[in-house]
Image (spheres, rainbow, N blue to C red):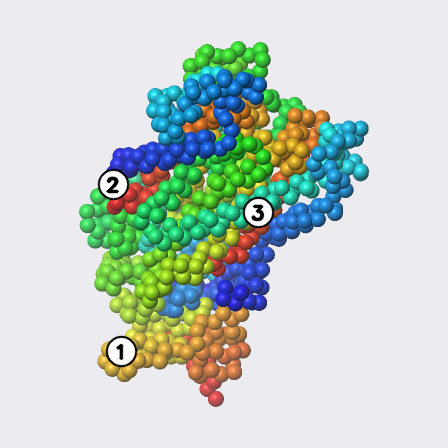
C-alpha cells in the first residue's frame, strides 16, 4: 500500500486506541472512590455547596452521559476547569507545553548525539577497554532511576561544586523575552536577547541531562550491539574486499543499517522523556507541562489529570506514526513489505 | 609450468572461541599460476573459505588468528604488504565472489550505489578517476556483461527487489571489476537453483576466458567444478591432501579420502547406493595428531598418526599428501 | 523436573552459560544479599523499631557515624535500619505485582494467540494496545492519584498496567507457533485446546517469560520508587526507599545522608536485578557461535 494509505490507516487506528484510552481513564476517574466536588471545595465546605457543584459538573448523571458530555467538550477543545489553577485545562496545557517541549528536545539532542558517538566507537572497538567502560557505565545508567540522578546531580553540580543553577527556568534579574513560541530559547534568539538565551540553557542542563541519562544508557547499548552485529556481516567484508576505503565502509555502509534500530526506538525516546518530565520538572521546579500534570495528580485535580494523560497519549501516538514513516524511508525492506500488502 | 601467481605456504589459522581454540588451518599449501583455473573441493567446514579470506585479508581477527605461514602474490608477502599495495591488490588484482549473494549485498543501498563505489575506487587506483556519469556508464556496461536485462533500471533497485540469480550476477559483476589477475569464487552456484547455478558458472567461465584471469573455484560438489577448471585440489580438515590435473584426479584418485569422495557420487548407470565415508570431520579443538584423516582411513598406518604427511609426487603434476605414496612405506 | 529436561548435566551447562559473564555473578550475589536482608531485617537491623512511627528528636539529624552508619533522619530514626526494612517494601511490591500479572497476562496471551483472528483475539489485543499507548510511569501515576495514594494502591496501579506486556509477549510466541505443524497434528488427533496450550505452547514461552520477569523486578522497583518519591505511593512513616528519598531531599545538601543512602540502595537493587536478568537471559539463550 502506498505511504499515504499507510499513514491514514495508522491515524485511524490511533484514534480508536485513544478513544478507548479515554473511556478507560474516564471510567477510572468516576469509579474510584472520592468525590471530585468535595475534593474541589475542600473538607470544610458545606454540603449544599458540594451538591450544587455536583449538579454543575454533571456528576449525578449516568456515566455514559457524563462521558459523552466530556467527549464532545473535548472535541471543542474544552477539557474542563482545573481545580488548582482555576483556569481552563486546555489553556493551562497550551501555556505550559512549550517549556516542556524545549526541555525534551534538548534532552533528546543530548541523548542521541552521545549515544551514537559513544555507541559507534564502542562497537567498532568491541572488547577494548573503552568498550568495557562503556558497557559498565550503561548498566549503571539504566539502573539509576531518573529522580535519583536528578537529586545526585543537583547535589553535585548545584551545591557541592556550585556550577549550575538548580531550580527554575530563568534566574531572577534576567528579562523574559516576549512570548512568541513559548520556548524561551527560541524566543530569546528571535529577539536577540542573548542573556536570556544562555541563562535558560544553563538552567536546562541539569534537568535535561537527568532526563537523558536513562535514554543514553539504553541507546548506547543498542547502537553498540547494532554495530557489532553488522560489522560481522558479509556485506562489510565484501565491501572491504573490493577495495572500498575503510572510512567509507565504516561511515557509509556500516552506519546506515546500524542506525535503523536506534531510529526505531525514537518513539520510546520521546515518550520516555515526556513521562520523565513529570518527575524531573517537579524536582527542578521547571514550569512545564510535566510539573502541571504532576501537581494535578497530587491534588486530585481530575480534569487536569485526564487532560494531561490524554495529551501524552495523543503525542505518543503521533510520534510513533512519524517514526514508522521515517523507518520506512530508511529501510527499503520495510518499504517493500508494505508495498506488497 | 607457469610462474606462480599465488603461493600459499604452510598456512596455519586458529579461531579462538569460548570453548577453546579451533585449529582450523593446519599448514595449507597451494600454488596457482598465471591464467590457471583450479577447483578447490572439500566438505563444509574444512577450511576453504577461511583460506580464501586470508588471501584478501578479510578474515575477522579476532576471533581468527593467523598462526603461521605465508601467502605470496606475485612474490609479495600479503600479510606484510604496505597499504598502498594492499589497496591495489583489492581494487585491481584479486577479488572474491561470496557464497551467499543476499548476504554480500548491503540491503539498504541501491545496487547502483554499491556497484558505482567499486568502479569508482577501481578506477581511482588505476590512475584514471571517473566522473559520476562515466561511472554510471561503466556500471551499465558491466551489468550487460553479466547478462542482466534492463541494466539502467536495475541500478535503481535495492537488492531485496531482485531474485537470487540476479543478485549473484551483480556480485559477479562487482568481483570482476576488481579482479584482473585472480578471481576467487566461493561456491557461487550453491545457493541457486540448479539451472541458474549452471548458467552462472558458465558465465564466470566465459568472462575469465576473455581476460585470462586465474580462478579458484570453490565447491563442495564435484560435478560443479568439472566444467570450468583445469586442476583440482582437494581439502580435508585444514589441509590440501591432493592436488592434480582434473582428468587425473577423477580417473585415478590417490588419497583414500578423494577415493571415497569420488566413489560417493551416485552413478545413474547402476551400481547401487554408494557407501560414503564412515566417520566425520575431526574436532578442531582437539584434532588427531599427524594426518587428520587417519581416524577414518581404511589404510591407516602407524606413521600416519605420528606426523603430518607432506606432498609426495605421484606422477606428472599430481601431488598427494599421504604416506601410502611415500618412500617410507615402500618396504 | 525430568520432563522439562532438567538434569544434572543441563544444570551444569546452564551454570556455565550463566557464569560466563562475571557481571551476572555480581548480580546474583547482590540479589541474594538483598533477599537475605529482606528476610532477616528484623534481626540484623540495629534499630528495628525505627522502621515506622518513632521519634527521638535529641538524636535527630546526626551525620553518619559508628553508631549510625547511615546517620539519622529528622525524626531521629536510624537510616540504616530503615533502609534495610525499605528493601522489604521494594521486593514485596515486585513480588506481588508479578505474581498477579504474570499468570493473568500469560493466560490472556495464550488465549488471544490460540484463537487468533477471532473476536476474542481482537478484544484482548486492542485492550493491550490501549495500555501500551501511554508511558507506564504516567499511567501508574494517574491510577495512583485517582485512588488514595498508598503503597497498596501503588501496587494495584502497577498491576493494572503491567499485564499487557506479558500478554503481548506470549501472544507473539503463540501466534508464531500456532501454525507450526506439530500444533496442527495435535489438533488433528483431537487434542483439546487446553492440552495444546498448556502442554505444547506454554513450555516454549517459559524461557522468555522468566527472563522478562527477572528484568521486570527491576522495572517494578524503579516505578514503585518513583511513585513513592513523588508522593503517590507509600506514605510516611513507611520506610519505603522512594519515600525516604523524598522525605530527605528538601534537606539537601546539609543533611545529604537522608536521601543519598536510600538512593544508593535503590540503585543497587535495580542494578543487581538487571545483571541477574541478563545472566538468566544468557543462560536460557540458544547456543550460537
Looking at the image, is mark 1 or mark 2 nearer the viewer? 2
In the displayed structure, A91 sits above or below B40; it is above
Up the image or down, C168 lies above or below B222; here it is above
**Above or below, A326 relative to B29:** above
Quarter of the image for the N terminus of chain B: give it.
Answer: bottom left
User: What is the spatial separation of the Cα atoms under label 1 and label 2, in whole angstroms?
Assistant: 51 Å
Seen in the picture, residue B105 relative to C73 is either above or below; the reply is below
Please rate how many residues cluster around mark 1, counting C-alpha atoms within 10 Å: few if below 14, some from 14 to 19, many from 20: few
Looking at the image, which residue is at 77% across and 37% down?
C68
> Rounded to the nearest whole Å, what is the CA distance between mark 2 and mark 3?
46 Å
Q: What residue does disc 2 label? A: A1
C-alpha distance separating marks 3 and 1: 67 Å
| Element at label 1 | loop
Same-chain check, marks 2 and 3 = no
Horizontal side of B157 relative to A21 (left or right) equals left
Q: How many marks?
A: 3
Q: Which residue lies under the disc numbered 1?
A: B267
Amino acid at each position: 500500500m502506498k505511504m499515504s494509505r499507510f499513514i491514514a490507516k495508522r491515524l485511524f487506528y490511533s484514534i480508536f486506541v485513544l478513544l478507548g484510552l479515554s473511556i478507560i481513564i474516564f471510567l477510572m476517574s468516576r469509579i474510584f472512590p472520592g468525590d471530585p466536588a468535595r475534593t474541589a471545595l475542600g473538607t470544610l465546605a458545606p454540603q449544599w455547596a458540594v451538591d450544587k457543584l455536583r449538579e454543575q459538573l454533571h456528576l449525578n448523571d449516568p456515566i455514559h452521559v457524563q462521558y459523552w458530555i466530556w467527549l464532545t467538550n473535548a472535541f471543542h477543545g474544552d477539557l474542563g476547569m482545573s481545580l488548582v489553577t482555576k483556569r481552563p485545562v486546555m489553556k493551562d496545557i497550551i501555556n505550559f507545553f512549550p517549556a516542556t517541549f524545549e526541555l525534551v528536545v534538548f534532552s533528546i539532542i543530548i541523548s542521541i548525539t552521545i549515544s551514537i558517538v559513544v555507541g559507534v566507537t564502542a562497537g567498532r572497538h568491541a572488547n577494548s577497554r573503552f568498550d568495557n567502560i562503556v558497557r559498565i557505565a550503561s548498566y549503571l545508567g539504566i539502573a539509576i532511576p531518573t529522580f535519583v540522578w536528578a537529586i545526585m546531580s543537583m547535589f553535585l553540580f548545584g551545591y557541592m561544586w556550585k556550577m549550575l543553577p538548580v531550580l527554575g527556568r530563568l534566574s531572577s534579574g534576567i528579562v523574559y523575552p516576549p512570548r512568541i513560541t513559548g520556548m524561551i530559547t527560541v524566543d530569546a534568539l528571535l529577539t536577540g536577547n542573548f542573556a536570556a538565551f544562555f541563562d535558560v540553557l544553563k538552567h536546562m542542563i541539569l534537568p535535561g541531562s537527568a532526563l537523558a541519562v536513562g535514554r543514553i544508557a539504553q541507546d548506547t547499548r543498542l547502537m553498540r550491539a547494532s554495530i557489532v552485529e553488522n560489522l560481522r556481516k558479509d556485506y562489510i567484508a565484501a565491501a572491504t574486499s573490493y577495495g572500498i576505503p575503510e572510512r567509507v565502509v565504516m561511515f557509509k555502509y556500516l552506519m546506515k543499517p546500524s542506525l535503523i534500530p536506534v531510529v526505531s526506538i525514537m518513539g520510546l525516546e520521546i515518550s520516555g522523556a515526556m513521562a520523565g518530565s513529570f518527575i524531573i520538572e517537579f524536582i527542578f521546579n521547571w514550569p512545564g507541562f510535566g510539573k502541571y500534570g504532576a501537581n494535578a495528580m497530587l491534588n486530585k485535580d481530575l480534569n487536569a489529570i485526564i487532560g494531561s494523560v490524554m495529551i501524552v497519549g495523543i503525542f505518543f501516538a503521533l510520534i510513533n506514526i512519524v517514526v514508522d514513516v521515517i523507518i520506512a524511508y530508511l529501510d527499503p525492506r520495510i518499504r517493500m513489505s508494505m508495498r506488497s500488502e | 609450468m607457469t610462474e606462480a601467481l599465488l603461493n600459499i605456504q604452510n598456512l596455519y589459522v586458529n579461531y579462538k572461541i569460548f570453548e577453546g581454540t579451533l585449529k582450523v588451518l593446519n599448514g595449507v599449501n597451494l600454488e596457482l599460476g598465471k591464467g590457471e583455473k583450479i577447483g578447490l573441493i572439500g566438505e563444509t567446514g574444512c577450511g576453504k573459505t577461511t583460506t580464501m579470506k586470508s588471501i584478501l585479508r578479510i578474515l575477522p581477527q579476532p576471533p581468527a588468528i593467523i598462526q603461521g605461514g605465508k601467502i605470496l602474490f606475485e612474490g609479495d608477502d600479503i600479510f606484510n604488504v604496505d597499504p598502498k599495495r594492499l589497496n591495489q591488490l583489492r581494487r585491481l588484482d584479486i577479488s572474491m565472489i561470496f557464497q551467499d549473494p543476499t548476504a554480500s549485498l548491503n540491503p539498504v543501498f541501491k545496487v547502483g550505489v554499491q556497484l558505482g563505489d567499486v568502479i569508482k575506487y577501481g578506477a581511482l587506483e588505476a590512475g584514471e578517476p571517473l566522473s559520476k556519469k562515466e561511472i554510471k556508464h561503466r556500471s551499465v556496461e558491466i551489468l550487460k556483461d553479466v547478462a542482466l536485462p534492463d541494466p539502467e533500471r536495475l541500478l535503481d533497485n535495492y537488492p531485496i527487489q531482485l531474485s537470487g540469480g540476479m543478485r549473484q550476477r551483480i556480485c559477479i559483476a562487482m568481483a570482476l571489476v576488481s579482479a584482473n589477475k585472480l578471481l576467487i569464487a566461493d561456491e557461487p552456484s550453491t545457493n541457486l537453483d540448479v539451472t541458474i547455478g549452471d548458467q552462472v558458472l558458465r558465465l564466470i567461465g566465459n568472462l575469465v576466458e576473455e581476460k585470462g584471469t586465474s580462478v579458484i573455484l570453490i565447491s563442495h560438489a564435484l560435478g560443479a567444478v568439472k566444467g570450468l577448471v583445469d586442476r583440482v585440489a582437494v581439502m580435508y580438515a585444514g589441509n590440501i591432501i591432493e592436488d592434480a590435473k582434473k582428468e587425473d584426479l577423477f580417473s585415478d584418485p590417490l588419497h583414500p579420502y578423494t577415493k571415497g569422495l569420488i566413489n560417493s557420487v551416485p552413478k545413474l548407470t547402476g551400481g547401487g547406493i554408494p557407501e560414503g565415508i564412515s566417520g566425520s570431520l575431526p574436532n578442531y579443538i582437539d584434532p588427531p595428531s599427524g594426518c587428520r584423516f587417519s581416524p577414518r582411513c581404511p589404510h591407516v598406518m602407524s606413521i600416519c598418526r605420528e606426523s603430518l604427511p607432506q606432498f609426495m609426487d605421484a606422477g606428472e603434476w599430481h601431488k598427494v599428501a599421504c604416506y601410502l605414496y611415500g618412500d617410507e612405506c615402500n618396504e | 523436573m525430568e520432563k522439562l529436561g532438567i538434569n544434572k548435566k543441563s544444570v551444569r551447562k546452564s551454570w556455565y552459560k550463566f557464569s560466563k559473564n562475571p557481571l551476572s555473578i555480581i548480580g546474583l550475589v547482590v540479589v541474594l544479599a538483598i533477599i537475605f536482608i529482606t528476610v532477616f531485617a528484623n534481626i540484623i537491623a540495629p534499630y528495628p523499631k525505627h522502621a515506622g512511627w518513632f521519634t527521638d528528636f535529641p538524636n535527630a539529624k546526626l551525620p553518619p557515624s559508628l553508631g549510625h552508619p547511615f546517620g539519622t533522619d529528622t525524626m531521629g530514626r536510624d537510616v540504616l535500619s530503615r533502609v534495610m526494612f525499605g528493601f522489604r517494601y521494594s521486593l514485596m511490591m515486585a513480588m506481588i505485582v508479578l505474581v498477579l500479572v504474570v499468570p493473568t497476562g500469560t493466560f490472556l496471551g495464550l488465549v488471544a494467540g490460540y484463537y487468533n483472528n477471532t473476536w476474542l483475539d481482537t478484544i484482548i489485543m486492542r485492550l493491550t494496545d490501549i495500555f501500551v499507548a501511554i508511558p507506564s510511569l504516567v499511567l501508574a501515576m494517574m491510577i495512583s492519584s485517582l485512588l488514595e495514594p498508598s503503597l497498596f494502591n501503588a501496587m494495584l496501579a502497577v498491576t493494572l498496567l503491567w499485564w499487557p506486556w506479558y500478554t503481548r509477549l506470549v501472544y507473539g510466541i503463540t501466534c508464531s507457533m500456532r501454525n507450526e505443524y506439530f500444533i496442527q497434528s495435535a489438533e488433528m488427533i483431537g487434542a483439546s485446546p487446553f492440552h495444546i496450550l498448556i502442554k505444547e505452547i506454554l513450555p516454549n514461552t517459559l524461557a522468555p517469560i522468566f527472563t522478562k520477569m527477572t528484568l521486570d523486578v527491576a522495572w517494578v522497583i524503579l516505578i514503585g520508587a518513583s511513585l513513592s518519591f513523588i508522593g503517590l505511593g507509600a506514605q510516611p512513616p513507611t520506610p519505603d526507599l522512594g519515600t525516604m528519598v523524598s522525605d530527605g531531599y528538601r534537606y539537601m545538601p546539609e543533611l545529604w545522608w537522608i536521601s543519598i543512602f536510600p538512593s544508593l540502595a535503590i540503585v543497587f537493587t535495580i542494578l543487581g536485578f538487571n545483571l541477574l536478568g541478563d545472566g538468566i537471559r544468557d543462560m536460557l539463550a540458544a547456543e550460537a557461535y
